Image (cartoon, rainbow, N blue to C red):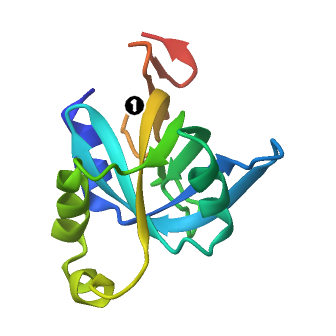
């Protein structure tokens, strides 16, 4: 994955994650996220009472999608990162994920001490990064290694 994509991910704090609910329907929610790069993994904190937690607490892993890059105003400067993959709860031996989360959201560490919040991770199996701000025009990088500029494969 290109450095520009990692830099973009690091510059963002909010995304929308959709998880597959026990009945098969999707449920999407706006969330704060942190990330680890190798392998690319996204980390989230949530209440066990929230809807997305129902799926995570019932199965070892669930299908999920993540979108980073909420566009406030259109105008040619947009960037979006779309990913599909799997989400699962952080295991007791994976405290490094929680530390990565608190490294990005230091203000949440103290608030979480006495909460029953859970942490979960999302591991992508497919992704697409779209950048409309490139001088050459809309550029799309895909997880299969292909790149298109203005719709033409390069």
Q: Which of 59 and 70 lies nearest the eye of the viewer?
A: 59
Q: Which of 142 and 37 lies nearest the eye of the viewer?
A: 37
Give the residue at x 24% y 29%: 2
- Within the image, what quadrant is residue 41 found in? top left
Q: Residue 43 location in percent, x, y? A: 35, 54
Q: Which residue is mark 1?
A: 136
Give the residue at x 54% y 14%: 152
Tell whether 144 sits left or right of 16: left
Tell whether 66 sits left or right of 36: right
Q: Quadrant of the C terminus?
A: top left
Q: Residue 48 location in percent, x, y? A: 55, 71
**3 up-or-down from 101: above or below:** above
Give the residue at x 25% y 61%: 98
On the question of residue 99 being in view, the answer is yes
Q: Residue 11 location in percent, x, y? A: 27, 60
Tell whether 25 sits left or right of 14: right
**58 up-or-down from 74: above or below:** above
Label 1 element class? loop
On the question of residue 139 being in view, the answer is no
**106 up-or-down from 22: above or below:** below
């Amino acid at each position: 994955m290109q450095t520009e994509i990692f830099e973009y991910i690091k510059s963002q704090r909010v995304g929308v994650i959709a998880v597959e609910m026990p009945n098969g329907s999707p449920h999407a929610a706006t969330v704060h996220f942190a990330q680890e790069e190798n392998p690319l993994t996204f980390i989230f904190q949530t209440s066990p009472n929230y809807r997305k937690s129902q799926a995570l607490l019932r199965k070892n892993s669930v299908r999920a999608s993540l979108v980073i890059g909420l566009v406030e105003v259109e105008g040619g400067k947009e960037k979006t990162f779309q990913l599909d993959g799997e989400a699962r709860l952080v295991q007791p031996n994976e405290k490094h994920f929680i530390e990565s989360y608190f490294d990005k959201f230091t203000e949440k560490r103290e608030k979480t001490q006495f909460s029953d919040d859970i942490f979960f991770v999302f591991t992508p199996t497919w992704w697409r990064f779209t950048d409309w701000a490139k001088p050459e025009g809309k550029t799309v990088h895909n997880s299969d290694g292909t790149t298109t500029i203005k719709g033409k494969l390069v």
